[in-house]
Image (cartoon, rainbow, N blue to C red):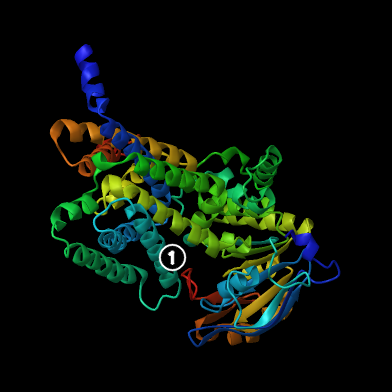
């Protein structure tokens, strides 16, 4: 019995593990809730692009501050908001298809980011932190920023719940009800940008889209109301974060990967065994 | 913000004046002028791509006109929340995680207001609206579980919950069986009794003739607008439908027009 307790408690006898746990759970929940809109509105590709496009902003901050990590959050935030609003504008005045525009923007921004980072000597280590996150390097300051901005995202989603619901289900209704659709759309894009910046330290740029999409996709298979989907998605996100950290600790896996793989395993289980609709049920 | 402050009681509910809309240089609607009065039930007919959906979207204030103007009860398009647009069923994501009651409540969010949650009274309105379309027993169903007729009635309930005074229905009868069509048509009669103005895009000229007060024949231009007898003449129909029309002279001397066109999409989404 004592042993079992030890397995669960031991990792968190270290302060940095506790901070990492708190940050991962917050990020897991915020990503999962925002992800419900990402999945509903078919914005997975956009989320991926946004995460990648943050890299040059972060790299620039990194170079300008001479390798310090303290200001990186703000650089990530600035870059994410800029890119989110830019893509929002591009897709409105579409001369080329939106996915093409995103494809061009995302790959080139990513390349620029890598190019910038590669000018620093120790670039492979730093790059891997940006790409895959570094949960164990979460400082108390990082944790405060994560909580504050994560809280802002969740609060905004709560406050605009019914407006975002209408905007996502029926944009024409939003227009006939004279809702400020453009403003609300931009708020939603900024929320995604905030989420991406908050999640960068924990899961990194490369795996971010999985945190946005996977828990929400599982939840969408299990629920039939938007708010239920958000709650279930948040629970899956939090559970994946905790489980991922344990796996990371005991099997010495990069934490971002471990969290994402846990979320994926949950999705596969749900996909196969969901009540009435799952593959396993259909076989019979 | 509320509709009544923007309404003059002595004005028609809808004035459309010299309205033109063009997309990428192609004229979808040309110089359309007409007026609707409260409680009228109007059928809008015309071949596919005639601009019926475009007209509805401009009237609803979703699409800006290229020239001309739309007035709701004597005032410009801004600020009105009294118009309900019910899209074609193919335009709706039926897998969306929302119940029937959720969808109907969506019509009321302006009455509820920003940063507020629906009150008991709002839910009462929603359930009364569902009761009016005989859908209250389905209130908690996910919208994807409904039949075509039930889906259409849910959106009508949404218009009622919105307290809409002008309701635009885009091909509501398409793909419905006869009893479901009949249910919708008798609901429209109820709306007329409540002085709600309704415009319905339809392909069924027989229903347009028998169940509506006035018929609008549209093909980019307003070919004719008036009582069914005046509008649905073979001459007018040939002018509107051109090559798509097929006139069949019945044994009893009546003329039937078979719209050879289909239930496909309009000219834009």
Q: Nearer the viewer, residue A129 or A209?
A: A129
Say above or below: B57 vs A63. Answer: below
Query: In the picture, which quadrant includes the N terminus of chain B?
Result: bottom right
Residue A144 falls in image quadrant: top left
User: In the displayed structure, does residue A104 sit left or right of residue B146?
Assistant: left
User: In the displayed structure, does residue A264 sit left or right of residue B124?
Assistant: left
Location of residue B70 in the rendering, given as x and y in whole percent from the top left corner:
69, 76
Q: Nearer the viewer, residue A50 or A269?
A: A50
Say above or below: B219 vs B82. Answer: below
Location of residue A240 in the rendering, given as x and y in whole percent from the top left corner:
29, 36
Q: Does the rendering let one see residue A5?
A: yes
User: In the displayed structure, does residue B76 sit left or right of residue B8?
Assistant: left
The tally of labels here is 1
- Farthest-out residue, top: A1
User: For the residue carrying disc 1, how many other residues have a C-alpha within 10 Å: few (<14), some (14-19), or many (20+)?
Assistant: some
Q: Does the rendering let one see residue B173?
A: no
The residue lying at 40 percent from left, 63 percent from top is A84
Q: Which residue is mark 1?
A: A85
Label 1 lies in what chain?
Answer: A
Residue A47 falls in image quadrant: bottom left
Location of residue B152 in the rendering, given as x and y in whole percent from the top left corner:
57, 54
Q: Nearer the viewer, residue B157 or B264?
A: B157
Query: In what element is the residue under mark 1?
Result: helix
- Farthest-out residue, right: B10
User: In the displayed structure, does residue A107 sit left or right of residue A180?
Assistant: left
Location of residue B257 in the rendering, given as x and y in whole percent from the top left corner:
58, 77
């Amino acid at each position: 019995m004592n042993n079992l307790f030890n397995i669960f408690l031991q990792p968190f006898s270290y302060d940095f593990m506790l901070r990492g746990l708190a940050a991962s759970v917050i990020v897991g929940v915020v990503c999962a809730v925002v992800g419900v809109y990402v999945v509903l509105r078919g914005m997975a590709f956009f989320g991926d692009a946004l995460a990648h496009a943050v890299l040059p902003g972060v790299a620039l901050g990194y170079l300008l501050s001479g390798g310090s990590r303290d200001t990186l959050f703000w650089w990530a935030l600035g870059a994410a908001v800029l890119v989110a609003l830019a893509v929002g504008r591009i897709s409105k005045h579409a001369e080329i298809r939106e996915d093409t525009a995103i494809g061009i923007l995302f790959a080139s921004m990513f390349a620029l980011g890598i190019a910038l980072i590669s000018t620093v000597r120790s670039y492979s280590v730093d790059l891997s932190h940006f790409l895959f996150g570094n949960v164990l390097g979460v400082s108390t300051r990082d944790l405060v920023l994560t909580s504050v901005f994560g809280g802002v995202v969740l609060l905004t989603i709560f406050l605009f719940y019914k407006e975002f619901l209408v905007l996502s289900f029926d944009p024409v209704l939003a227009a006939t009800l004279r809702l400020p659709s453009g403003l609300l759309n931009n708020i939603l894009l900024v929320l995604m940008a905030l989420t991406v910046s908050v999640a960068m330290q924990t899961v990194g740029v490369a795996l971010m889209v999985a945190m946005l999409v996977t828990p929400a996709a599982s939840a969408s298979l299990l629920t039939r109301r938007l708010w239920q989907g958000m709650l279930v998605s948040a629970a899956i996100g939090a559970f994946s974060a905790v489980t991922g950290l344990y796996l990371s600790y005991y099997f010495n896996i990069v934490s971002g990967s471990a969290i994402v793989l846990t979320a994926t395993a949950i999705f596969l289980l749900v996909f196969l065994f969901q009540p009435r609709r799952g593959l396993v049920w259909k076989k019979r | 913000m509320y509709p009544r402050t923007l309404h003059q009681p002595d004005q028609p509910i809808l004035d459309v004046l010299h309205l033109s809309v063009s997309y990428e240089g192609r004229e979808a609607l040309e110089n359309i002028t007409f007026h609707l009065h409260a409680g009228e039930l109007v059928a809008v007919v015309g071949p596919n791509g005639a601009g019926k959906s475009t007209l509805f979207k401009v009237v609803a204030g979703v699409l800006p006109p290229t020239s001309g103007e739309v007035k709701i009860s004597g005032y410009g398009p801004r600020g009105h929340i009294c118009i309900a647009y019910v899209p074609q069923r193919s335009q709706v994501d039926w897998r969306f995680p929302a119940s029937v009651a959720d969808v109907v409540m969506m019509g009321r969010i302006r009455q509820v207001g920003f940063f507020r949650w629906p009150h008991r009274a709002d839910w009462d309105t929603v359930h009364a609206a569902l009761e009016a379309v005989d859908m209250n027993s389905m209130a908690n169903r996910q919208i994807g579980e409904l039949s075509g007729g039930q889906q259409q009635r849910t959106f009508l309930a949404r218009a009622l919950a919105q307290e809409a005074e002008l309701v635009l229905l885009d091909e509501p009868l398409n793909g419905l069986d006869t009893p479901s069509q009949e249910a919708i048509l008798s609901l429209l009669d109820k709306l007329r009794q409540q002085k709600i103005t309704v415009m319905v895009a339809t392909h069924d000229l027989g229903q347009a003739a028998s169940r509506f007060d006035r018929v609008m024949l549209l093909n980019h231009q307003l070919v004719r607008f008036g009582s069914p007898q005046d509008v649905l003449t073979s001459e007018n129909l040939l002018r509107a439908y051109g090559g798509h029309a097929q006139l069949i002279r019945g044994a009893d001397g009546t003329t039937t027009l078979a719209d050879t066109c289909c239930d496909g999409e309009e000219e834009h989404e």
